[in-house]
Amino acid sequence: MTDLVSWLTQQIDYDEDVAEIAIAARRDAFGDEVTIVYEDGVGGYADTVLHDPARVLRQVAAYRRILSRHTTTDSGVDEDGKPWTITYCGHCNDPGPCGDVRDLLSIYSDREGYDPSWTVE
């Protein structure tokens, strides 16, 4: 599960980086006072609302909170002195990625490195 969580964290980090770049570019082009007027309906500016960089940053923060609630790592040393680490869902107590983590993963199913075995059933 650790590789899965690392991969998902990289995707969330990438989204955050792109959103921050977009915000900086908008600020450089238009200054701090930007007002965007959105049209209603398909073909208007509705897609811009859904991909507003500030919204993406709020979404990234929410994904990180969800992932944090559902990812617990324990470690220790076994009786032979060998270290061990296990990552599991500390919220649902599932041994593997729970449904909520799989739902987050599915958002990025179009990205390189996505493992189809992570698909929500």
Image: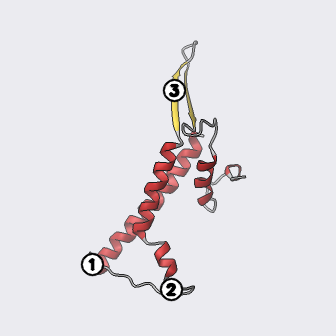
SS at badge 3: strand
Q: Is residue 60 visible in the rendered structure shown here?
A: yes
User: Which sits in the foreground, 64 or 7?
Assistant: 64
Between the residue at mark 1 and the residue at mark 2, the CA separation in whole angstroms equals: 23 Å
Q: Residue at x 56, y 87 (%)?
A: 43
Within 10 Å of disc 1 (Cα), the crowding (few <14, some 14-19, many 20+) is few
Reading the chain from its start, which is encountered first: label 1 or label 2?
1
Residue 99 drawn at (x, y percent): 64, 48
Residue at mark 1 = 33
The amino acid beneath tag 3 is Ser
Q: Is residue 77 left or right of residue 54?
A: right
SS at badge 2: loop
Q: Is residue 63 above or below residue 28?
A: above
Q: Is residue 120 above or below residue 34?
A: above
Residue at mark 3 = 75
The amino acid beneath tag 1 is Glu
SS at badge 1: loop
Q: Quadrant of the N terminus?
A: top right
Of tags 2 and 3, which is closer to the observer? 2
Between the residue at mark 3 and the residue at mark 1, the CA separation in whole angstroms equals: 49 Å
Residue 32 drawn at (x, y percent): 26, 75
- Give the label on residue 40, or none: 2
